[in-house]
Image (cartoon, rainbow, N blue to C red):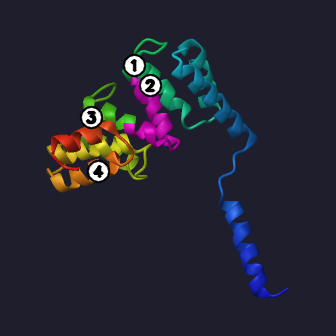
Amino acid sequence: MKKWLLYPLMITLTMAACSKTRSPEQEQARSTMLQGVSFYEKQQYPTALPLFEKATAQGDSKAPRYLGLAYLNGNGVTKDLPKAFEFFQLGADRGDITSKYWLGYLYENGFGVTKDLSSAYHCYQQASVRGDHVSAPAMTALARFYEQGIFVKQDLKQAVSLYQKSAKTGDKQAIEALEKLNVR
């Protein structure tokens, strides 16, 4: 067989080996988490929370976020900000960027943890990297830091740039901030 014929085959095999495939356990954890989300969105917290706990124990990255939100807001549990922080930290450690955003929120406001604007800024920065609708709240929060000079030197150009990027995803807070700044 000619070498040039092997090259596309090698590329395909390499890409297949590098792609993220889920194990049956990971698929089960994701399925459990999604069932929990369905109940959580209907505010059926007593049914949702055990599913999130199970998915978290199975290693799901997003389930801890929902447990964090439950403890942050008192949805189906007694409000417990330090516990919310623990679950957001777990989710962030597992790669969930929305959990990373919520960590920033808790650090910024001193909810469940000592107020730490440096940590808040870095959490928002890390959560905003994707630049899509999932990271829009983090981009908007980061833009606000630049607009108001929170922890960083005030930089309206950077703030507007981040607000615009977030607004393109439909983020209402970013759109409102641009309107206040008279920027389109």
**First along the sequence among labels 1 and 3:** 1
Q: Residue at x 19, y 49 (%)?
A: 183
Task: State the predominant SS element of the stretch in magenta.
Answer: helix
The mark closer to the camera, 4 or 2, is 4
The local secondary structure at tag 1 comes to: helix
The local secondary structure at tag 3 comes to: helix
Q: Where is 104 relative to 79, above or below? A: below
The mark closer to the camera, 2 or 3, is 2
Point out residue 67 in the picture as x, y percentages from the top left corner.
50, 24
> Do residues under tags 2 and 1 come within 8 Å of each other at their CB atoms?
yes
Q: Marks 4/3: CA distance? A: 22 Å
Q: Marks 2/1: CA distance? A: 6 Å
Q: Is residue 159 left or right of residue 138?
A: left
Name the quarter where the N terminus is drawn. Answer: bottom right
Identify residue for label 2.
69
Identify residue for label 1.
73
**First along the sequence among labels 4 and 2:** 2
Tag 3: residue type? Answer: Glu
Identify residue for label 3.
108
Nearer the observer, 163 or 123: 163
Tag 4: residue type? Answer: Gln
Q: Is residue 15 left or right of residue 65?
A: right
Residue 35 is one of the magenta-drawn residues: no
Residue 94 is one of the magenta-drawn residues: yes
Tag 1: residue type? Answer: Asn
| Circle on res. 164 | 4
Magenta residues, start to end: 82-101
